[in-house]
Image (cartoon, grey):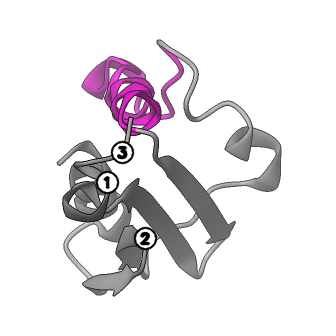
Amino acid sequence: MNVLDNAIDAVRGEGKIVIKTAWHDPVVEICIRDTGCGIPPELISKIFDPFFSTKGTHGTGLGLAISYGIMKEHGGDIIVESHVGLGTEFKIILPDQKNNENKP
């Protein structure tokens, strides 16, 4: 939800948000792509840091940090690709729990 909220903010009421899901044994992939403002390259490495925000007083800087922690806790990952002025894609990768339920 945090990633989607950020995409909504990025498009500022104009543009597109595309959500795709896929299963690539043994992982589930969720891609959220927007045609918003994009993230400058120098900020990409900071976006998952707690309390880092580009939204000023509008954001707490906790949304992506929490999302990242949840993904890691479940053995997953988040990959970000962004281009200023063109948009951003967040790829959320999670292990397929159904295939892993009998594994230690």
Q: Quadrant of residue 63?
A: top left
Give the crowd class for mark 3: few <14, some 14-19, many >=20 residues within 10 Å: few
Q: Using the image, tell me which numbered label, if any, was put on residue 100.
A: 1
Q: Are marks 2 and 1 in contact (CB under 8 Å)?
A: yes
Span shown in magenta: 51-74
In the image, farthest residue toward the top: 51
Quick check: 45 left or right of 4?
Answer: right
User: In the image, residue 70 lies at what x, y percent?
Assistant: 33, 31
- Real-space Cα separation, disc 3 to disc 2, in angstroms: 12 Å
Q: Nearer the viewer, residue 7 or 21?
A: 21
Helix, strand or loop at label 2? It is loop
Q: Nearer the viewer, mark 2 or mark 1?
A: 1
Give the mark nearer the N terminus: 2 vs 1: 2
Q: CA distance from mark 3 to mark 1?
A: 5 Å
> Disc 2 to disc 1, how far (Cα)?
8 Å
Residue located beneath label 2 in the image = 26
Residue 14 location, x and y as percent?
25, 81
Q: Nearer the viewer, residue 91 or 102?
A: 102
The answer to whether the residue labelled 3 contacts the one labelled 1, judged by CB atoms less than 8 Å apart, is yes
Quadrant in which the C terminus appears: top left
Could you tell me if residue 18 is visible in this image?
no
- Residue receiving disc 3: 103
Q: Would you identify the image quadrant in which residue 24 lies?
A: bottom left
Residue type at mark 1? Asn
